[in-house]
């Protein structure tokens, strides 16, 4: 009888241990080690979107990849056709995220008005429908390789470069923000996957885009200076 009682105690202990396992599994599957690709994160968010999606929710979904993933997301927003002058608004988050990468922050800080800013489910699904196929195609070729930096060191250097690209996006010049935004998206994806070859491509594209924006700014400044010579006052 005593033996049966001990056996029941052992079975109860095993059952209790089994009930604890889901908690351990849940902890092991926290987004800090989320195995999903960036395209899958976008796809899952769009499928689950039944209410407006806030930037706060995006940051939570991207978790340990939040800096690189948010950098990619905000850059992609600037690749979608939007009314002229919108880059002044959509480029600011790029600068904010990049500057915090340079500062070495552990998590992204966004102003409260921006964190609560939402995208309608239909709009978010439209963005995802355009972005996911492109990301899936790119993810076939990218993988961790030839990464020249330590984790934080790489974040700081790339953050400094994408800050310049973000400022280029913010400049209110026609057709000047697409290429810097595209270069930023490439660098963001490379940073997500620690792909040194893709990063090099993004850096080259970024340098070219900065050169083009600088050229635009130089020409615009000279045109304004020339026009000012005709000003009667």
Image (cartoon, grey):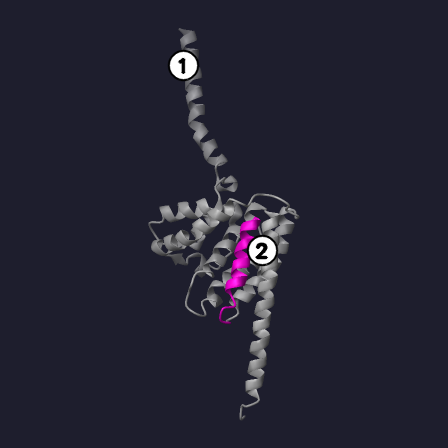
Examine the structure image and report whether residue 139 is included in the region drawn in magenta.
Answer: no
Q: Are marks 1 and 2 in contact (CB under 8 Å)?
A: no
Q: Secondary structure at mark 1?
A: helix
Position of 134 compared to 164: left or right?
Answer: left
Q: Residue at x 58, y 68 (%)?
A: 212
Q: Residues within 10 Å of mark 1 (few under 14, many from 20)?
A: few
Residue for badge 2: 202
Q: Nearer the viewer, residue 54 or 147?
A: 147
Residue for badge 1: 8
- In the displayed structure, would residue 198 be above or below residue 209? above
The percent position of residue 23, horizontal first and vertical second, equals: 45, 32
Q: Residue at x 63, y 49 (%)?
A: 152
Q: Is residue 151 visible?
A: yes
Quadrant where the N terminus is found in the figure = top left
Q: Secondary structure at mark 2?
A: helix
Q: Residues within 10 Å of mark 2 (few under 14, many from 20)?
A: many
Q: Which residues are magenta?
A: 173-191
Quadrant where the C terminus is found in the figure = bottom right
The percent position of residue 175, horizontal first and vertical second, equals: 49, 68
Examine the structure image and report whether residue 190 is included in the region drawn in magenta.
Answer: yes
Taking the view exactly as shown, the residue that stands out farthest to the top is 1
Q: Nearer the viewer, mark 1 or mark 2?
A: 2
The percent position of residue 85, horizontal first and vertical second, equals: 45, 70
């Amino acid at each position: 009888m005593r033996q049966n009682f001990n056996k029941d105690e052992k079975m109860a202990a095993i059952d209790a241990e089994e009930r604890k396992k889901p908690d351990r599994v849940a902890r092991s599957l926290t987004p800090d080690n989320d195995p999903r690709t960036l395209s899958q994160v976008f796809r899952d968010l769009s499928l689950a979107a039944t209410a407006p999606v806030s930037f706060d929710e995006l940051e939570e979904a991207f978790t340990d990849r939040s800096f690189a993933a948010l950098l990619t997301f905000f850059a992609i927003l600037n690749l979608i056709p939007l009314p002229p002058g919108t880059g002044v608004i959509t480029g600011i988050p790029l600068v904010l995220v990049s500057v915090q990468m340079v500062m070495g922050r552990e998590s992204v800080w966004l102003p409260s008005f921006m964190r609560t800013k939402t995208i309608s489910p239909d709009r978010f699904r439209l963005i995802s429908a355009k972005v996911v196929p492109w990301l899936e195609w790119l993810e076939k070729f990218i993988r961790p390789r030839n990464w020249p930096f330590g984790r934080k060191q790489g974040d700081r250097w790339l953050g400094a470069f994408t800050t310049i690209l973000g400022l280029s996006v913010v400049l209110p010049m026609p057709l000047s923000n697409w290429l810097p935004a595209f270069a930023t998206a490439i660098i963001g994806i490379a940073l997500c996957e620690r792909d040194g070859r893709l990063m090099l491509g993004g850096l080259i594209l970024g340098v070219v885009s900065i050169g083009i924006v600088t050229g635009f700014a130089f020409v615009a400044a000279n045109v304004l200076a020339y026009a000012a010579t005709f000003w009667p006052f």
